[in-house]
C-alpha cells in the first residue's frame, strides 16, 4: 500500500556475470532518472551505465530508500547483509535464475515504476542470524550476519569433522558429520533442505540446526527458538581434518582457530524484502520445489 512521500533515492546493483542483469540495470537507471529519482549505482556498473548517476560500493548503495537487485537469489543474499543494518528495503528481480527469493521479473517491474516510487508495495521482514567467531582467548575474530544460513565445516566441506555443540549453554553433544547448518526460515529451503532439514514458513522466527551427512543414525535436525544461542567448537580430542570454516550464506568464509568457537544468535536487524504483488509462500514453495504435488 502507498505510504508517505514518494521515494527520491533508489540504488541499483546487478549480477555482473549476467549480461541481461547488466542491461536491465541501465534501463532502470535511465527510467528512474527520467522520473526525477536520484539513482545510486554499484561502482561495477560504471562502464555500462552512462548518465547523471552516482557510483559507489555497497555501503553507498544501501544509503538509499530502496535498492533494486538484478540477478538472482545469490545477489539478493549478498545485498541483504549490507542493507539490513541500514533498514533499506530490497526489491529482488529474477534475471534467468531459480528465483526463490528474487521473484519479480524486470519486464513487469518496469511497468510498475510509478507504484514503486509512490511506495505502493508491501514489505516482508525476514529473520536473520548473527555470527561471531571467537579465538581461543575469547576475543572476537570475525562477525557477520546471514539471511540464509551459517555452515560450520572443513574448508572443502567434504571431510568429517567433530563439532561439539551447545544450545543456551547446555551441551547437546558432538556431531561427527561433514558439517553443521544453522539455518533461518528463509534459508530452510536451501542447503538445509538438501541436508534433510525441515522447511519453515519464511515469516517465522526460529533457527534450524541440521547436520550435514552425519555419521550416525541418531543425529536429527532441531528447531530452536529465535532467542537461542548456538555455540560450536572442535573439541581437543575431536576429528579436525584441516581448517574449519564458518560460511555465511554460501558466500563469505571465516576461519575458526583450532581452539576457537563459533557462536550464532539472532541478529539485531531483519532483512526487508519488497513485494509488489499478492504472493503466497506456499504456492511459490510448491511451484519451485514440490511441483509433483499438483500432478
Image (cartoon, rainbow, N blue to C red):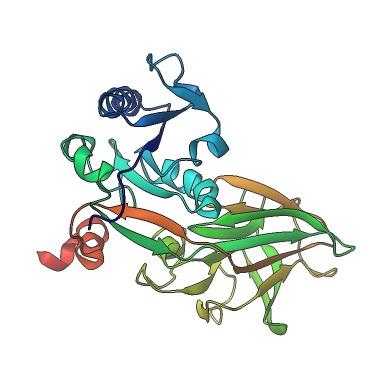
Q: Quadrant of the N terminus?
A: bottom left
Q: Residue furthest front?
A: 5
**Residue 271's x, y, as percent?**
45, 57
Q: Residue at x 30, y 44 (%)?
A: 6
Q: Disc count in the image?
A: 0
**Residue 108's x, y, as percent?**
16, 39
Q: Residue at x 11, y 65 (%)?
A: 294
- From the viewer's perspective, tell me whether residue 167 is left or right of residue 43: right
Observer-nearest of 134 and 217: 134
Does residue 213 appear in the picture of this structure? no
42 vs 205: above or below: above
Q: Residue at x 55, y 45 (%)?
A: 251
**Residue 63's x, y, as percent?**
51, 41
Q: Residue at x 46, y 64 (%)?
A: 192
Does residue 224 appear in the picture of this structure? yes
Q: Which quadrant of the figure has residue 16?
A: top left
194 vs 206: above or below: above
Observer-nearest of 198 and 60: 60
- From the viewer's perspective, tell me whether residue 128 is left or right of residue 165: left
Q: Residue furthest bottom?
A: 170
Observer-nearest of 292 and 115: 115
Amino acid at each position: 500500500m502507498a505510504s508517505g512521500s514518494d521515494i527520491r533515492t533508489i540504488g541499483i546493483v546487478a549480477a555482473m556475470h549476467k549480461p541481461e542483469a547488466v542491461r536491465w540495470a541501465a534501463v532502470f537507471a535511465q527510467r528512474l532518472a527520467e522520473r526525477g529519482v536520484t539513482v545510486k549505482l554499484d561502482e561495477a556498473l560504471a562502464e555500462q551505465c552512462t548518465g547523471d548517476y552516482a557510483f559507489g560500493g555497497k555501503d553507498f548503495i544501501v544509503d538509499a530508500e530502496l535498492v533494486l537487485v538484478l540477478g538472482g537469489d545469490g545477489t539478493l543474499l549478498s545485498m541483504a547483509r549490507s542493507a539490513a543494518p541500514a533498514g533499506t528495503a530490497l526489491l529482488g528481480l529474477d534475471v534467468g535464475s531459480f528465483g526463490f527469493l528474487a521473484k519479480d521479473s524486470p519486464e513487469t517491474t518496469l511497468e510498475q515504476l510509478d507504484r514503486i516510487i509512490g511506495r505502493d508495495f508491501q514489505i516482508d521482514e525476514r529473520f536473520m542470524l548473527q555470527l561471531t567467531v571467537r579465538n581461543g582467548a575469547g576475543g572476537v575474530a570475525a562477525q557477520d550476519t546471514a539471511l540464509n544460513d551459517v555452515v560450520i565445516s572443513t574448508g572443502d566441506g567434504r571431510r568429517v569433522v567433530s563439532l561439539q555443540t551447545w544450545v543456551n549453554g547446555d551441551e547437546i553433544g558432538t556431531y561427527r558429520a561433514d558439517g553443521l547448518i544453522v539455518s533461518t526460515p528463509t534459508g530452510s529451503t536451501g542447503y538445509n533442505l538438501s541436508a534433510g532439514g525441515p522447511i519453515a514458513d519464511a515469516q517465522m522466527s526460529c533457527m534450524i540446526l541440521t547436520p550435514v551427512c552425519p555419521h550416525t543414525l541418531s543425529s536429527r535436525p532441531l528447531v530452536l527458538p529465535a532467542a537461542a544461542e548456538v555455540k560450536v567448537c572442535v573439541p581437543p580430542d575431536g576429528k579436525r581434518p584441516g581448517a574449519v570454516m564458518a560460511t555465511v550464506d554460501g558466500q563469505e568464509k571465516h576461519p575458526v582457530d583450532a581452539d576457537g568457537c563459533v557462536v550464532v544468535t539472532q541478529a539485531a536487524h531483519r532483512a526487508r524484502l519488497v513485494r509488489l504483488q499478492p504472493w503466497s509462500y506456499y504456492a511459490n514453495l510448491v511451484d519451485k520445489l514440490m511441483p509433483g504435488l499438483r500432478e
